[in-house]
């Protein structure tokens, strides 16, 4: 049996963003929110939320006839883990090549660069 990834797929992240924003949500809540953006099957949302529960990103409690899902990990914690995973896989764990790439491709504004400079001076 294949081990579940500790990071999120694009679809999983999209669902987690909705649950983080709402604080708690049923499958129907997430389904209706996703329908505003794209066509999706209710059963797909239900399956994805079950997978997120198995991966321990969501917990559920039964409320009346539905399950209410809550995030079991803070958004910042998940994002840090995803960034760390990306850095490890793409840049061998080093953030410097990523920053160089962003600067060279002009994806950072002068305000972004100033903020990074300020943050780097605060870090030991």
Image: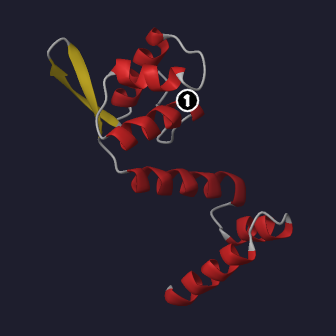
On the image, which quarter does residue 111 sit in?
bottom right
Q: How many marks?
A: 1
Residue located 51% across and 25% down the image: 34
Q: Can you identify the residue that label 1 sits on?
A: 11
User: Where in the figure is residue 1, as x and y percent of width and height?
Assistant: 47, 21
Left or right of 91 in this view: 44? left
User: Where in the figure is residue 98, as x and y percent of width and height?
Assistant: 72, 64
Left or right of 47 in this view: 13? right
Q: Nearer the viewer, residue 94 or 99?
A: 99
- Colouring mode (rainbow / by chain / secondary structure / one colour): secondary structure
Q: Residue furthest front?
A: 36
On the image, which quarter does residue 47 sit in?
top left
Left or right of 93 in this view: 1? left
Is label 1 in a helix, a strand or a loop? Answer: helix
Q: Nearer the viewer, residue 47 or 20?
A: 20
Residue 45 shows in the view: yes
User: Where in the figure is residue 29, as x and y percent of width and height?
Assistant: 36, 23
Is 57 rendered above or below residue 75? above
User: Neighbour class for label 1 at 10 Å: few (<14), some, many (≥20)?
Assistant: few
Residue located 64% across and 84% down the image: 117
Q: Nearer the viewer, residue 91 or 10?
A: 10
Residue located 51% across and 10% down the image: 41
Is 65 rendered above or below residue 88? above
Q: Residue furthest left?
A: 64
Is 4 rendered above or below residue 75? above
User: Where in the figure is residue 67, as x and y percent of width and height?
Assistant: 24, 20
Residue 124 shows in the view: no
On the image, which quarter does residue 96 sit in?
bottom right
């Amino acid at each position: 049996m294949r081990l579940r990834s500790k990071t999120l797929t694009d679809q999983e992240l999209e669902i987690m963003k909705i649950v983080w924003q709402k604080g708690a949500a049923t499958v129907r809540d997430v389904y209706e929110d996703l329908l505003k953006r794209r066509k999706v099957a209710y059963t797909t949302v239900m399956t994805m939320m079950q997978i997120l529960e198995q991966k321990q990103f969501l917990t559920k409690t039964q409320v009346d006839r539905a399950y209410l899902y809550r995030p079991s990990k803070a958004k910042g914690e998940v994002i840090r883990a995803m960034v760390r995973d990306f850095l490890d896989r793409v840049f061998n764990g080093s953030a410097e090549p990523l920053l160089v790439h962003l600067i060279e491709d002009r994806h950072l504004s002068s305000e972004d660069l100033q903020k990074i400079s300020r943050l780097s001076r605060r870090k030991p």
